[in-house]
Amino acid sequence: MKEFAPLLHGYWYLLRGAGMTVLMAAGSIVPATVCGVLLALAQVFGNQAVRSIVVAYLFLIRGIPLLVLLTFTYYLLPLTGIDLPPFWGVVMVFAFYYAAFMSEVFRAGILSLPRAQWDAARSLGMTQRLMLQIVIFPQALRLASPPFVSLCANLVKATSLVSIVGLWELTMASREIVERTLAPFQIFLGAAVVYFCICYTLALYGRYLERRVLQGH
């Protein structure tokens, strides 16, 4: 038990770092989801020019590692005169990065609906906006929910990269404790357990959504 004394003394500091990690992830997921939905709708219903722009954006963002984008944005924004707080700069990068992946999830959910659903809505005289609001989008969201939750769990784990640009969160908190205690194994084991608890909670919610989708079909 003596070996884990540094972890027992520093667990509260780790939990504070975990709170910042959850706050950062939650602040990124909301705009990423909104942007992902808009990008998916642009791909499905936009004209050729809009679709080309969206596809180019998706290939560009998904082809660059997140760590490179974080570092690039961290050093680029001050040069352009944009003085964002580090927290909001990181949230912006995460939002635009994961929106590219979420858009594909939502687009797949929309396109996976049977053609009969679209035809039935049109036969009732629904406008495209009403059809999306009442018929298409609620069903597409149910189908897209499980992979969406998996992306949210990946986003939580990816927040460990922000320590490279000096933003304090769970990984940075772990490194600070290690510098004081010289007990890397114990401290990072505790950090791994905290990350696991956060992601496992999201995974359980994803399984719950999967069961709801199966029951709905």
Image: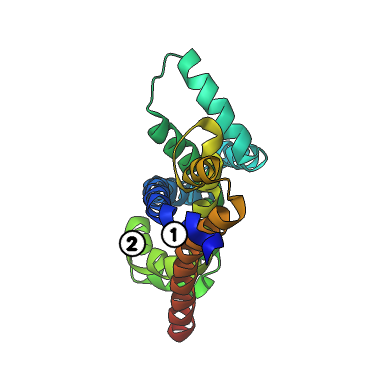
Q: Earlier in the sequence, mark 2 or mark 1?
A: 1
Q: Is residue 19 above or below residue 86?
A: below
Q: Is residue 133 above or below residue 69?
A: below
The numbered dot on residue 8 is: 1
Q: Residue at x 43, y 32 (%)?
A: 89
Q: Is residue 120 above or below residue 97?
A: below
From the top left corner, tell me how far across and down residue 82 is, in percent. 41, 19
Residue 50 visible in rendering: no
User: Based on the displayed image, in which of its 4 quarters is residue 141 positioned?
Assistant: bottom left
From the top left corner, tell me how far across and down residue 2 is, in percent. 53, 62
Number of residues whose C-alpha sits closer than 10 Å to that of mark 1, classed few (under 14), some (14–19) or many (20 or more):
some
Label 2 to label 1: alpha-carbon separation: 51 Å
User: Which residue, given by chain and number where applicable, does mark 2 sit on?
Assistant: 133
Left or right of 204 on screen, residue 184: right
Residue 115 visible in rendering: yes
From the top left corner, tell me how far across and down residue 158 is, in percent. 55, 48
Judge by depth and name the residue closer to the eye, 62 or 13: 13
Judge by depth and name the residue closer to the eye, 134 or 14: 14
Q: Amino acid at mark 1?
A: Leu
Judge by depth and name the residue closer to the eye, 164 or 14: 14
Q: What kind of element bears circle 2?
A: helix
Left or right of 95 on screen, residue 49: right
